[in-house]
Amino acid sequence: PIPQAGEALIKVLRAGICATDLEIIKGYKNGRVGTLGHEFVGKIVKINGFSDKFVVGTRVVAEINICCDKASISRCRTCQKEEYVLRRNHCEKRKVLGIFNNDQGSFAEYITMPFENLFIVPSIISDEVATFVEPFAAAVRIIEQGIIKNKDKIAIIGDGRLGLLATLVCSLSFPQAEIVLIGNHRGKMELVQRENLRQKMANDMEDCDDEFDVVIVATANMKGLEKATKLVRPLGHIIEKTTCASNTSSLTALVSQIFNDIVVKEITLSGSRCGPFRKALEIMENNYDTVHELLSRMVSAVFPLQDIAKAMELASEKGILKVQLQVSS
C-alpha cells in the first residue's frame, strides 16, 4: 500500500490472532472482504509528510480506529465535539483496521496508518509483548473510565484472554483493592499471581451475592452478566467488556431477570471497549517484568505468516489463549 499524506508505511513484525478475527471468518461483519488482523507491532519504513515524532526505523503500534481527519470540513458530528475518547472510540465515519470499512489488516507484510494513530514502543518491550498492546489497552479502558476506587472489592468474571488482562491491569493499578478472578479453568487463572488477587472457581461463588463494589464481565455471554448482577452489591457497578451472542431461546427470560436485578439493586451498568495505547504502554514499561511474565505465558504458539491457516485453526481450539504470527524480523 502507498501511504497518503500524514501516513506512514509500516512493515509488520508480529501480529496476534484475536477472537474477533475468528468470528469474522464465521460471518461477523458480514464475513468482511479484506485482510484480517488488528493486533500488531511494526517498524516504519516510509513517511509521507512532516513528523517531528516518527522516523524511518521507529518501532510502533497503532490504535485501530481511524477517525475523521481533524482538518476536514466534513468531520462527523462526533469528531466535531473534539472530545478525545468520544472521537477515538465512536467516530461515525471510522475505519477499523482489519475489521470494518478498511481493506487493510495486520496479517500482511505492510500496512499504512495515520501518524495520529501511531505510538512508539519503548525499547524494553519485546515484539511478543508489544503485539498485546491493543487488547491490553482494552483492559486499561476500565481504568480510564474512572469507575473503580483503590480500596474497592472487585470481581472479574471470565478467565479468557481479556479476563486475564483485566485482572493484571486492575491489580497493578489498584494495589489496595481486593480482587477476585472467577472462572472455570484453574490453570488459566493461576497464570496471574498478585498479592491482592484470589482465584475462585465459578461453582464456588454461590454464596457471594451482594459482595462486590465493582464486577467486570469478560465472558462474551449473557450468563456472565446475569452472574454479575448477583455478585455486585446494591448501588454497585458492573462493567461489561464483551458483546454477547443472542442465539438462545431463553434469552428473553434471562434479559428480563438481569434487568429486574439492575432496577431493584440500583446497579449501574457500563459498557467498555477500546482503550488508550499511551497509558497501556506506560503500564507495560513501568511493570515490565510482571507484564512480560503473564503475556509470554499466554502465547500458545507462533507461526510464520505463510502458515496462517494452521495458526487460525489452532487459535480456534478450546483452551488456546493466544496465537501470534511472525511476519518479518
Image (spheres, rainbow, N blue to C red):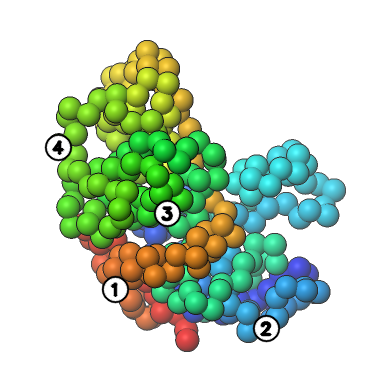
Sequence-first disc among 4 and 1: 4
- Which element is circle 1 on? strand
User: Residue placed farthest to the top in the image?
Assistant: 264
In terms of depth relative to the viewer, which is nearer, 225 or 157?
Answer: 157
Q: Is residue 219 left or right of residue 176?
A: left
In the rendered structure, the answer to whether residue 246 lies left or right of residue 140 reads left
Residue at image position (55%, 45%) is: 144
Q: Specify the farthest residue to the bottom.
A: 329
CB atoms at circles 3 and 2 under 8 Å apart? no
Distance, label 4 to label 3, CA atoms, is 27 Å
Residue on which disc 4 sits? 203
Q: Under tag 4, what secondary structure? A: helix
Circle nearer the N terminus (3, 2)? 2
Q: Is residue 43 above or below residue 317?
A: below
Q: Which numbered disc flags the more N-terminal residue, 4 or 3?
A: 3
Q: Position of residue 227 (x, y in %)?
A: 27, 30
Q: Marks 2 and 4: which is nearer the front?
A: 4
Q: Nearer the viewer, mark 3 or mark 2?
A: 3
Q: Check if mark 2's residue and mark 4's residue have beta carbons within 8 Å.
A: no
Residue that badge 2 annotates: 56
Give the spatial CA distance, label 1 vs label 3: 27 Å
Q: Nearer the viewer, mark 4 or mark 1?
A: 4
- How many numbered tags mark residues here? 4
Query: Disc 1 or 3, which lies upstream in sequence?
Result: 3
Q: Position of residue 295 (x, y in %)?
A: 36, 66
Name the kind of residue labelled 4 in the image. Answer: Asn
